[in-house]
Amino acid sequence: MSKTSRRVVFGVLLIVTLVVSAGGALGYLGRLTLVFDRQPGKPIAIVEEVPGPPDGPPCPIDARYFDEKPEGLRPEVLQAWLSLRAKAAEQGVQLCLNDGKRSRGQQQAEFDEAVEKFGSAELASKYVLNPPDRSMHVIGFAVDVQPIESAKWVEKNGGTLGWCRRYENEQWHFEYHAGYATGGCPALVPSATGG
Ligand SMILES: [Zn+2]
């Protein structure tokens, strides 16, 4: 190898090293500021810190429930939610988003409330997922639809748009997965807490 080509190789290596470390540094900063990873469908830790609205205006067809803004959901989930809602509206059905995105802190607060209500962490964990990271609401894939008649519509018609009911004990809870639209909904399991 000539002196010049050796110099060129060294130069190229130096540039590669600089680019890789700059990318690494930016990637790290990106993790602190960006909500979603640039790799599609891959959540990063920070998404769990994104809160959803704690409540919202009352559901116009049943004031016992909220109709939250769909804030904090992952972008593809938000799109899918809007499509679901539009399809329902076409058929004269109104869907209220009683609860959508929660942050880890919001999920933890729900758990703490449940501990107070039921008297023990063991009982509370039958109703509210803990640790909070396990909740599909925390990672931005789940919505709770009310009133129950509207939830029933979603159970019947949401599958082709990727929305499936997952739990026997939560008629209102739906999770989005693009694969459900093509592969169909998975079988129901007893509850999110596995019991
Ligand atoms: Zn839910």
Image (tube, rainbow, N blue to C red):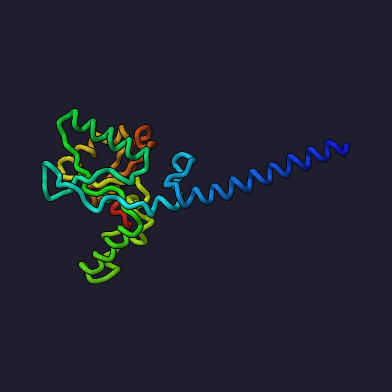
Q: Nearer the viewer, residue 165 or 137?
A: 137
Which quarter of the figure is the C terminus placed in? bottom left
Asked if residue 124 is positioned above or below residue 190 in the image, the reply reads below
Residue 185 is left or right of residue 66, and the answer is: right
| Rendering quarter of residue 88 | top left
Left or right: 120, with 10 as reference point: left
Q: Is 48 on the left-hand or right-hand side of 195?
A: right
Residue drawn at point x = 37 percent, y = 32 percent: 182
Q: Which quarter shows the N terminus?
A: top right
Residue positioned 78% across, 42% down in the render: 10
Farthest right residue in view: 2
Res 106 → quadrant: bottom left
Residue 195: tell me if it is visible. Answer: no
Residue closest to the far bottom = 119
Work out whether 130 lies above or below 92.
Answer: below
The image shows a total of numbered marks equal to 0
- Residue 24 at x, y percent in the picture: 58, 48
Q: Does the rendering let one see residue 180? A: yes
What residue lies at 21% left-to-right and 48% top-to-bottom?
98
Residue nearer the viewer, 121 or 30: 30
Side (left or right) of 32 relative to 115:
right
What residue do we see at 22% from left, 46% from top? 68
Q: Residue 12, position in %: x, y? A: 73, 39
- In x, y percent, where is residue 129? 32, 59
Q: Residue furthest top?
A: 90
